Image: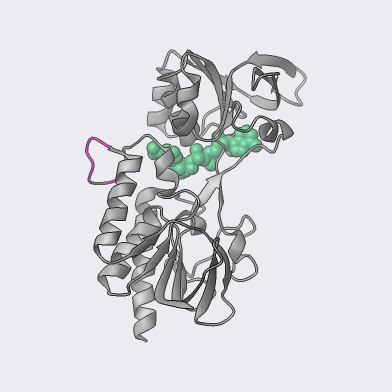
Amino acid sequence: MEHTKCLIIGSGPAGYTAAIYAGRANLEPIEYCGLQMGGQLTTTTTVENFPGYPQGVDGNQMMADLQEQARRFGTDVRDGIITEIDLSKAPYVATTDRGDKIEADTVIVATGASAKYLGLPDEQKYMGQGVSACATCDGFFYRKKTVAVVGGGDTACEEAIYLAGLCQKVYLLVRKPYLRASEVMKKRVANNPKIEILYEHNALGLYGDNGVEGAHVVYRKGEADERKYDLAIDGFFLAIGHKPNTDIFKGQLDMDEVGYIKVQGDTPRTSVAGVFAAGDCADPTYRQAVVAAGSGCKAALEAERYLNQ
Ligand code: NDP
């Protein structure tokens, strides 16, 4: 069985930063990139809030640069997924999607989070045929068309603005009477003539014979003036938050009720010695690339200290 001093699972800002630090500490880390190499930032447009980029940076470019930096310091960056892991005793044994087994003295979990869906059966029915959770991945298919984005946070605003650059019209379906997004995002959405905000709206379902042709929506659900109607759209984009990718650690690492890995205080230490968590999989609060990168750094430093002990 292959052996490593440090196995890193995940390739977002947390995973790559951990890889840079672990590599520079001569831990010769192996990093498995997961389903979406580069993580969530590869599905965003310009990253404007990562320090050091006064003009912003393309999310894909940033992740490619981080990967190159991780490789430069000796990280074995691999395309693949860890599908199982046994954390019952050290060294820990991970199994890849190809069935390979890797024994690891330390594990850095940086598996991030994935987009949430509303749970409507129609989301499954029209997946890839009008339903998407990534405007930058799929927006291109809706040029000059009409789309709806669900959500009222920064992601929803960012997606709506991106789509407004391609589409003829963008509805923003917000379940509350206000946006939760930051002030700068609220202003950009309000100033975009192609975006119409539909407050107090929920989607009930989708319809269409050839992909999505519209959404069944309800205004002021449960109120005296509730109104149900159909909104003609070609695309339905979800932007309602994320779920941590921690299923393979269930029952092995302490987690909160949503599935975020619990860490000890402001350290990345988990409930298992030698296993550290970094980035969005352990951060229900901030969920920012720069915070993820910082926690990846801490995880690698902790792994090094643990091995030295
Ligand atoms: P948020 O959790 O901030 O927002 C989720 C939005 O989806 C809320 O408006 C919420 O409504 C709505 N929502 C949740 N569930 C449902 C549902 N079942 N039906 C309808 N609406 C629903 O997630 P984001 O992904 O927007 O942002 C996550 C973090 O990332 C935030 O801290 C954000 O600031 C940050 N971010 C920063 C960016 C930037 O600065 N460039 C870009 C993107 C994200 P409600 O308000 O009613 O709960």
Q: Which residues are magenta?
A: 50-56
Is residue 301 a member of the stretch shown in magenta? no
Task: Note whether residue 51 is visible.
Answer: yes
Q: Could you tell whether 305 is left or right of 121 in the image?
A: left
Q: Position of residue 32 (x, y in %)?
A: 44, 61
- The relative height of residue 4 versus residue 213 in the rendered view (above or below) is below
Residue 149 x %, y %: 55, 26
Residue 207 in the image, given as x and y percentages of width and height? 71, 21
The residue located at (37%, 60%) in the rendering is 77
Residue 160 makes an appearance in the image: no
Along the horizontal axis of the image, is 176 left or right of 285?
Answer: right
Question: How many numbered discs?
Answer: 0
Residue occupying the point 52% across, 53% down:
284
Query: Can you say whether 203 is above or below 94 in the image?
Result: above
Quarter residue 292 falls in: bottom left
Residue 141 locus on image (x, y percent)? 49, 23
Magenta span includes 54: yes
Query: Please, which colouring scheme is shown?
Result: one colour
